[in-house]
Image: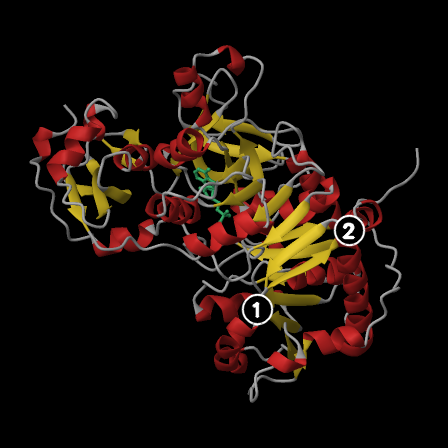
Amino acid sequence: MQDFPLLVHRVLDHAARWHGTTSILSRSVEGPLVRSDYATLNRRARALASAAERQLGLGLGSVIATMAWNTARHLEIWYGLMGLGAIVHTLNPRLFESQLSYIINHAGDQWIFTDLTFVPLFEALQDRLPHVRGFVILTDEAHMPAATTLRNPLCYETLLTWGDEDYGWPELDENTACGLCYTSGTTGNPKGVLYSHRSNVLHGLMCELGDAMALSARDTVMPVVPMFHANAWSLAFSAPLSGAALVLPGPKLDGASLYEILDMGQVSFAAAVPTVWLMLLRHLEQHKALSLPYLKRVVIGGSACPEAIMKAFVDNYGIDVIHAWGMTEMSPIGSLAVMSRRAAGLSPDEWWSLKLKQGRPPFMIDMKITDDEGNSLPHDGQTFGRLKVKGPAVARSYFKDEGAAAFDADGWFDTGDVATIDDYGYMHITDRAKDVIKSGGEWISSIMIENEAVGCNGVQEAAAIGLPHPKWDERPLLVVVRKPGSAVTAADIRAHLVGRIARWWMPDDVVFVDEIPHTATGKISKLELRERFKDHRFSLAPDDVQT
Ligand code: AMP
């Protein structure tokens, strides 16, 4: 058989050659919606590669960073610079400045490609980035900031005019590194995950599979999930390799803007974290006349998806929901709750109980649950264990060999998640190992309490945390944000939870707050909540619980 190195720019070559006129619609940072296609993307990516080589001195192994929304320009940078042999490091603008300067210096970023949005951020930060040679601002001359103090500011569109659209990609080994993404680092410094051409192509193919996201050339795909968060869940690769059209939402991720672009772009498939979907659903609730005639499937992941969100899509709009799980270290997809032949025989209620789980691993992911000593645990749907994974798009180590404790000698990566796996093969995340509530020697799943609590009328968001307890080690505190106008009480929420969770899991207290803190990747910041409530005293006496 022929040798065919799995290189990401081959994905673009394929899309440009066989789906050249297929549309890419972006909401630009300057404002208007802009239409492009795969043939144009291919020409501009090659022009960028050639200009970056000639003008910026970039080549094999150079590391550059992007801080950019999901737009066609950002996609050109991924393909153009990865094709050149460089490593594209995506920066999450929601990180603290100290974390940003740490990761930019740690990665050794030479140039930063930034959207206009973030120019002020880098003007303030650049003195802490001694190795960054300059900044490419993703706009045209007409929109360049009149006066910027950025070091060596270059206009992206001008840079492109200096390049050659017929640039020929260099020969690369498929194991060449091409992408770098740091984990959000809720404890300690963020750690880097270095993706290769091969891992990105294999992961893109895996996500395209019928029993994963089932993408095809008949789809119009919108990655709402940012390209700076966990590789945009593969969609920058899996959509072009399937020939799907793309819609890129740019900087506007509020409910009204998402609705507008979903409708205008006739999006059939979209992927986002639950909080984003919540904003869209709220917008639809407020504007009853609106409908979603084009949208057929949505993927929800990044944190556990509450049943209320999944049911709203299925029951109110006839849209299928795929609950997915993964992490930066896995490129990121690890499992999807899609139907199997065996599951097809279940009653609708029984199927829903599987659909709400995080699902089955597709080909190229293996997973197991173990106890703390590393012994495999049964797939009985009851036994909780540490979730460990393997696969060609799973990290073998962190960048610069940090965090070695997460990888064992047999190649299993410890995800830090705690899960059950049932007899049907559906994995269910019950917690992060560090968030699980340890009460009387048993584990309480904070996520399961939260998911039930948000099903209670009047509850917008809920977070369960374990607080120290004199008798039981830890007991759950439930922190709740009410829906606007709601007067839901602690007693209402407790009454709702009766029968839905084990009696001894019942939160010892329910407190109401205006806002729950989130991390840079949109997850509830349990660390901050535990700190905020560390002096909280439970209202129930120690003996009232866990009997
Ligand atoms: P990140 O690397 O930022 O994508 O974060 C990965 C972590 O997010 C995982 O280890 C899980 O703890 C959590 N996560 C991702 N998807 C889900 C999901 N569907 N349900 C529950 N937790 C999730």
Q: Looking at the figure, which quarter contains the N terminus?
A: top right
Residue 217 position in % (x across, y down): 72, 39
| Mark 1 lies within 8 Å of ligand 1 (Cβ measured) | no
335 to the left or right of 20:
left
Image height check: is 310 above or below 81? above
- Check residue 446 in the rendering and tell me which mark sits there, or answer none: none
Residue 36 position in % (x across, y down): 71, 58
Residue placed furthest toward the right: 2
Look at the image and name its color scheme.
secondary structure
| Mark 2 lies within 8 Å of ligand 1 (Cβ measured) | no
Q: Residues within 10 Å of mark 2 (few under 14, many from 20)?
A: some
Q: Secondary structure at mark 1?
A: helix
- What's the CA distance linking mark 2 and mark 1? 37 Å
Q: Are marks 2 and 1 in contact (CB under 8 Å)?
A: no
Q: Quadrant of residue 439?
A: top left
225 to the left or right of 71:
left
> Considering depth in this image, is 536 or 269 the residue closer to the camera?
269
Q: Residues within 10 Å of mark 1 (few under 14, many from 20)?
A: many
- The residue tagged 2 is 21
Q: Looking at the figure, which quarter contains the C terminus?
A: top left
> Marks 2 and 1: which is nearer the front?
2
Give, as a three-letter code, the residue at label 2. Thr
- The residue tagged 1 is 104
Name the residue at 70% across, 51% down: 23
Q: Secondary structure at mark 2?
A: loop
Residue placed furthest toward the top: 345
